[in-house]
Image (cartoon, helix red, strand yellow):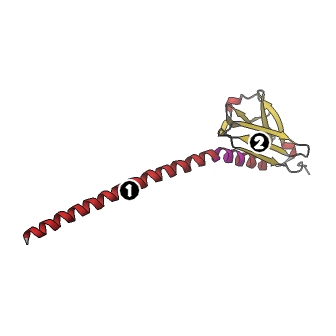
Amino acid sequence: MNRNSRRSYSIDTLFVITLLGLFLIFLLMMLLFSTQAYRTAVEGNQENNNLYTASAYITEKFRQHDSSQSMSLDTLDNLPAFCMTDTIDGTSYVTYIYLLDHQLKELFTAKGNVPSPEMGISIASLETFQAEETSEGFYRISMEDLQGHTTSLLLHPGPPVTSE
């Protein structure tokens, strides 16, 4: 009787070790597949993030300056720029949005200053940025990210602000 209990003990141990081994193999496979899925999701998010960030930022800035008198197209050190003007406590300021070295940048400065484009703050990484005014008074903003995805915004400023 003593011999039979030893055999069943060896088989039980072998079964538990085999089951544990299968569990570890499935766990490693699950980790490998989930790592690949996470990597794919992050890459897709990064591709869309630059265009989304740039579009949302420009749209919000446009809404903050919702007057046809405060929008214009200009240049900043020979770089085409989309400009918005503000008057704060009697002083005029200009916000330039432009592309420099594949970086969409914003520069806020007092009107009349001669700023350097390198002074701007980076908003997003883009391949191209173009702003143009249409004959109907709209501003068409076109952008392309570094992966070749494009988007275009068609924004219309509000009526001129009149002082009463």
Residue nearer the viewer, 69 or 125: 125
Q: Report the residue at 20% width, 64% height from top.
A: 11
What kind of residue is marked 1? Answer: Leu
Quadrant of the image occupied by residue 54: top right
- Which secondary structure dominates the residues rendered in magenta? helix
Q: Position of residue 75 (x, y in %)?
A: 80, 31
Q: Is tag 2's residue or tag 1's residue first in the polypeptide sequence?
A: 1
Per the image, the residue denoted by label 1 is: 27
Q: Which residues are magenta?
A: 48-55
Q: Report the residue at 80% width, 39% height from top.
A: 131
Q: Residue furthest left?
A: 2
Is any part of residue 151 visible from this angle?
yes
Residue nearer the viewer, 35 or 105: 35
Mark 2: which secondary structure? strand
Q: Position of residue 156 (x, y in %)?
A: 84, 49
Is any part of residue 88 visible from this angle?
no
Magenta stretch: residue 53 in it? yes
Task: Tell how many labels.
Answer: 2
Q: Position of residue 140 (x, y in %)?
A: 82, 44
Q: Position of residue 12 (x, y in %)?
A: 21, 65
Q: Report the residue at 68% width, 29% height from top.
A: 118
Q: Report the residue at 46% width, 52% height from top.
A: 33
Mark 1: which secondary structure? helix
Q: Residue furthest bottom?
A: 1
Q: CA distance from mark 2 to mark 1?
A: 47 Å
